[in-house]
Amino acid sequence: ELLINQIAAGEVIERPAAALKELLENSLDAGATDITVQLDNGGIKLLRIRDNGRGIVRDELALALMRHATSKIASLDDLQSVESMGFRGEALASMAAVAQLTLSSRTAHDTHGWMVEAIDGRISEAAPASHPPGTTIELRELYFNTPARRKFLKSEATEFAHCEEAFKRIALSRPDVGFSLQHNGRTVWQLNPGLRIEDRGLRGEDDGGWMQNAALKRVAALLGAEFGNAAVPVSGSAANLTLHGLAALPAYSRGNRDAQYFFVNGRFVRDKVASHALRQAYQDILHHQRHPAFVLFLELPAEQVDVNVHPAKSEVRFREGQGIHQFIFHTLQQALAAPAL
Ligand code: ADP
Ligand code: MG
C-alpha cells in the first residue's frame, strides 16, 4: 500500500507546487474564506496551509489520508459533471506517502480540534489538538523517503517560483477569498478578500461590471497596475457560454510570457483550442503579438467540458471545441478592436 502510494504520489505530487495546488483546492472545496500558506525552502522543507473552512470531524481525519477516500463523489454520474475542485481522493494519501504529514482540524460543532499524523506512511490515532474552526495541513521534508524524486527538484528559488505561480492562479480565480503567502518567514502576498462572487455576478450572468471591484483589485494586486492600465475589458456571452476578463494591449510588456491566465469554470487550464483562438484574435486585430497577456474566465455548463483528462496537468477537453473556438475568437476580437473606435 505504501509503495503504491509512493508511485501514485510521484505522478500527482510532482513537486511542492503540485501539493500546494491540491491543498488550496481542498481548502476552497471546504468553503474557506481565508487561507494562509507558509513555505520554507521552496516548500521542500515545510509546506503549511491553514484555512477557516468547514473542517473534518475526528472520525474522518485518518480516512482523509487514505486512497480514494474522497467525500466528493456520491455516484458515478458525478464524475460526468464535477463541480468541486478535487474529485480523485488521492491527493492527501499521496502526500502522506512522500512527506511527514500532520492534519489538524476542527468543525464548527467541536469544542476543540483533533489531529492525526502520517509518519513513514503510517497514520496515527486521532489526538486532541488546539485548533480554531478550520483545517491545517503541514508537510515536512517532501520526498524525504523518495530520494530519486527529490533529486529532480530544482533549486529552492525555482520550487518557490512554481509554488507562487500555483498560488497566483488560485488567488486570481477567487477574489472573494483572502489569501496570504509567506516564504522563509517573509510575507510575499497578502490579499484581502473582495466582495463575494455571488454578489458580483462573476459566474454566469453577464452584468458587464463584474470586474470593477473585487476581481479587478485582485488582478491589479497580483499583476500590477500596469497590466490593468494596458488592458481592455473582455465581456461576451452566447447561448450558455460567457467569457469575461481583461486582455492586455501591446503596451504591456512586462514578462508577458507569464501573464496568461485562462480559467474554465473557475479552474486554471492550459488549452490548445483556447490558446489558438486567443492568439488568432490578437493577430487579427493587433497583427503581431507573440505573447499576449490576459486574465480570462470562460464559464459553460459542466457537462460540456471534460476536466478529467489529466487533472494534475490542468487540461480540459471541450465537447464542442469548434463552437468554443469561434466564441472565444469573436469575443476577443471585439474587445481588442474596441479601443480603436
Ligand atoms: P479529494 O479532494 O479528491 O476528495 P483529497 O485527498 O484531496 O481528495 O482529500 C480527501 C478528503 O479530505 C476530501 O474529500 C475532504 O473530505 C477532506 N479534506 C481535505 N482537505 C480538507 C480541508 N482543507 N478542509 C476540509 N476537508 C478536507
Ligand atoms: Mg483534493
Image (cartoon, rainbow, N blue to C red):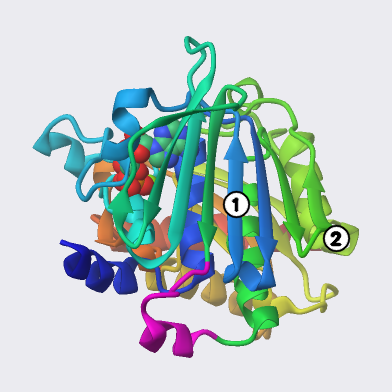
Q: Quadrant for the C terminus, please.
A: bottom right
Residue closest to the eye, 310 or 145? 145
The residue at the point 64 percent across, 86 percent down is 155
Mark seen at residue 224: 2
**Is residue 340 covered in magenta?**
no
**Which tag is nearer the camera, tag 2 or tag 1?**
1
The residue at the point 30 percent across, 38 percent down is 62
186 up-or-down from 30: above or below: below
Q: Where is residue 153 in the image (x, y as percent from the top left)?
A: 51, 84
The residue at the point 23 percent across, 55 percent down is 319
| Residue extent of the magenta highlight | 141-153
Left or right: 248 in relation to 10: right
Q: Position of residue 83 (x, y in %)?
A: 34, 37
Mark seen at residue 48: 1
Q: Tell me if residue 298 can be seen.
A: no
For the residues bearing labels 2 and 1, Cβ distance under 8 angstroms: no
**Count of marks overlaid on the render:** 2
Left or right: 74 in relation to 217: left
Q: Residue 340: name its quadrant.
A: bottom right
111 up-or-down from 45: above or below: above
262 up-or-down from 203: above or below: below
Left or right: 297 in relation to 305: right
Q: Quadrant for the N terminus, please.
A: bottom left
Which amino acid type corresponds to the residue marked 1 in the rendered image?
Arg
